[in-house]
Image (cartoon, helix red, strand yellow):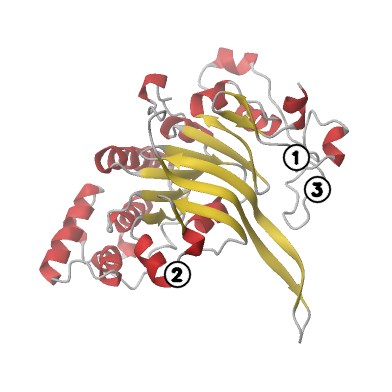
Amino acid sequence: MSVAVAHPEKRKNLENSDVILSVRGLKKHFPINSGFLIQRQVGAVRAVDGISFDIYRGETLGLVGESGCGKSTAGRTILQLYKPTEGHVFFEGQDLAMLGPNAMRQMRRQMQIIFQDPFASLNPRMTVGNIISEPLAIHGLYPDKRERQEYVESLMQKVGLNPYFINRYPHEFSGGQRQRIGIARALALNPKFIVCDEPISALDVSIQAQVVNLLEDLQSELGLTYLFIAHDLSMVRHICDRVAVMYLGKIVEMGPTDEVYDNPLHPYTQALLSAVPVPDPASKESRQRIIISGDLPSPARPPLGCNFNTRCPVVFEYCYHEPDPEFIEATPRHFVACHRVTEV
């Protein structure tokens, strides 16, 4: 789907913003066990393998990459839905990995998630009203039944749902409406930070823009901060202030959205952007199409040296033997991890 690109003057000014979330050296490895009676670990799937970045208050950071690169795992590990194998996640200065169960329970009021699949993320045996009000009951908010219903109805109106449908079940709604229910549930506790885990990928193209516009309106109205996980690069350019490109558990490039899209430095980013449809036939004819050969390597057995060396169109001998390239600031606020860029 072709989406209008946000103009540079519409991008948020992040220079004076404070950091709401800071990720440092985050890893999530899933153990591979073998044995029938006695289980022993014989390896690990390195789904997230050492990522670091900051998210500024009020911004939208896009996290992109092909399927299997670790985007969703990164989002869930940041929220502590998966316990990190290593690394730290600081939310408003507090290290989430060091919090106890009760403290983490209170912190979850500030951080929520919108799941990818609106069909699987809603309990089919619960009414819409019960789904949206469940977080309120868990955290002991709005104990008065009438006040709680009024609040839930206001949330439904805020996301574009008719409060008259409060006693209906998820199967009575379309995919776009179900995702709006998920958004209302995420807003119930008035969070500051929301992980949007591919919130539009399961929706019809005609509905995707509506949901994205809703997310933008809610961000402007409520001052929300988003980590927007997606693989639709056109949509990411439309909604995100900065973008981070992920490959095989690592971030290979990160910077302001327009800078990364107009001047991609990593060969993987260049290949991804060369595949984005463009409406202008003249631009399509003039640009170079970069084809990545081969499949994504297994995160259980990443290649030696640079992770991208098995598929990189500009690989050279240095990439096979040296450790992962250093994440450097190539231009102001534009970071990249590539030996060839470093050498140049």
| Occupied quadrant, residue 188 | bottom left
Q: State the image coordinates of residue 321 (x, y, percent, origin top left).
A: 87, 41
The number of numbered badges drawn on the structure is 3
Foreground mark, 3 or 2, reads 2
Residue 276 seen: no
Q: Secondary structure at mark 3?
A: loop
Q: CA distance from mark 1 to mark 3?
A: 8 Å
Q: CA distance from mark 1 to mark 2?
A: 38 Å
Label of residue 303 in the image: 3
- Do callouts 1 and 3 mark residues in contact (Cβ within 8 Å)? no
Vertical arrangement, residue 338 with respect to residue 172, above or below? above
Q: Residue at x 33, y 60 (%)?
A: 109
What residue would you read off at disc 2?
A: 100
Q: CA distance from mark 3 to mark 2?
A: 37 Å
Label of residue 83 in the image: none
| Residue type (three-letter) at the residue carrying disc 2 | Gly
Q: Nearer the viewer, residue 335 or 296?
A: 335
Q: State the image coordinates of residue 281 (x, y, percent, origin top left).
A: 56, 16
Q: Nearer the viewer, residue 168 or 24?
A: 24
Vertical arrangement, residue 291 with respect to residue 287, above or below? below
Q: Earlier in the sequence, mark 3 or mark 2?
A: 2
Foreground mark, 1 or 2, reads 2
Q: State the image coordinates of residue 208 (x, y, percent, origin top left).
A: 40, 41
What residue would you read off at disc 1?
A: 308
| Residue type (three-letter) at the residue carrying disc 1 | Phe
| Occupied quadrant, residue 184 | bottom left
